[in-house]
């Protein structure tokens, strides 16, 4: 099950959980060590801080901007975890370069 929660760095956050059980009113989802209840009627989290909702399978379509942003974010996080590693810096640089090439390919 995919869960969409509030904005994080101006983008929605998506996590994956496992359906633990379904009751008359709720879907109980296990996300790591956490257990959350979502209303069966509309898929919105019952209780908890902030808004979160279940995303039906196949509804979330990735557009190019989201895919590119995830690619750069991943390379940036790897680089920030290992600041002294030049290979990770080169991977970040390459990811940014590839995204720029792809995004400007049809502009000419």
Image: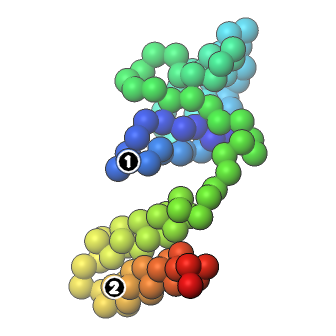
Which residue occupies the extreme left position in the image? 84
Please determine whether, in this image, residue 83 is positioned above or below residue 68.
below
Q: Position of residue 107 (x, y in %)?
A: 56, 79
Residue appearing at x 24%, y 85% in the figure? 84
- Label ID, residue 45: none
Residue appearing at x 57%, y 29% in the figure? 53
Residue appearing at x 50%, y 29% in the figure? 52
State the image quarter where residue 85 is shown: bottom left
- Where is the C terminus found, in terms of image quarters? bottom right
The answer to whether marks 2 and 1 mark residues whose Cβ atoms lie closer than 8 Å is no
Tell me the distance, in whole angstroms, between the alpha carbons under discs 2 and 1.
24 Å
Q: Can residue 44 be seen by looking at this rendering?
A: yes
Residue that mark 2 sits on? 89
Q: Position of residue 26 (x, y in %)?
A: 65, 15
Of the numbered discs 2 and 1, the one sitting upstream in the chain is 1
Nearer to us of marks 2 and 1 is 1
Q: What colour scheme does the image use?
A: rainbow
Badge 1 marks a residue whose secondary structure is loop
In the displayed structure, does residue 83 sit left or right of residue 96? Answer: left
Badge 2 marks a residue whose secondary structure is helix
Q: Identify which residue, 92 or 105, lies in the foreground.
A: 105
Please determine whether, in this image, residue 42 is positioned above or below residue 64.
above
Q: Residues within 10 Å of mark 1 (few under 14, many from 20)?
A: few
Q: Identify which residue, 20 or 2, lies in the foreground.
A: 2
Residue that mark 1 sits on? 10
Q: Identify which residue, 66 or 106, lies in the foreground.
A: 106
Residue appearing at x 38%, y 47% in the figure? 10
Q: Residues within 10 Å of mark 2 (few under 14, many from 20)?
A: some
Q: Can residue 102 be seen by looking at this rendering?
A: no
- Where is the N terminus found, in terms of image quarters? top right
Q: Position of residue 73 (x, y in %)?
A: 41, 66
Please determine whether, in this image, residue 107 is positioned above or below residue 17.
below
């Amino acid at each position: 099950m995919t869960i969409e929660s509030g904005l994080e760095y101006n983008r929605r956050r998506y996590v994956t959980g496992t359906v633990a059980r379904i009751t008359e009113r709720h879907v109980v989802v296990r996300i790591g060590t956490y257990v959350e209840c979502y209303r069966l009627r509309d898929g919105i989290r019952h209780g908890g801080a902030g808004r979160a909702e279940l995303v039906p399978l196949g509804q979330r379509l990735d557009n190019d901007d989201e895919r590119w942003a995830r690619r750069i974010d991943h390379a940036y996080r790897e680089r920030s975890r290992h600041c002294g590693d030049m290979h990770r810096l080169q991977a970040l640089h390459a990811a940014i370069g590839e995204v720029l090439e792809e995004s400007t390919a049809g502009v000419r």
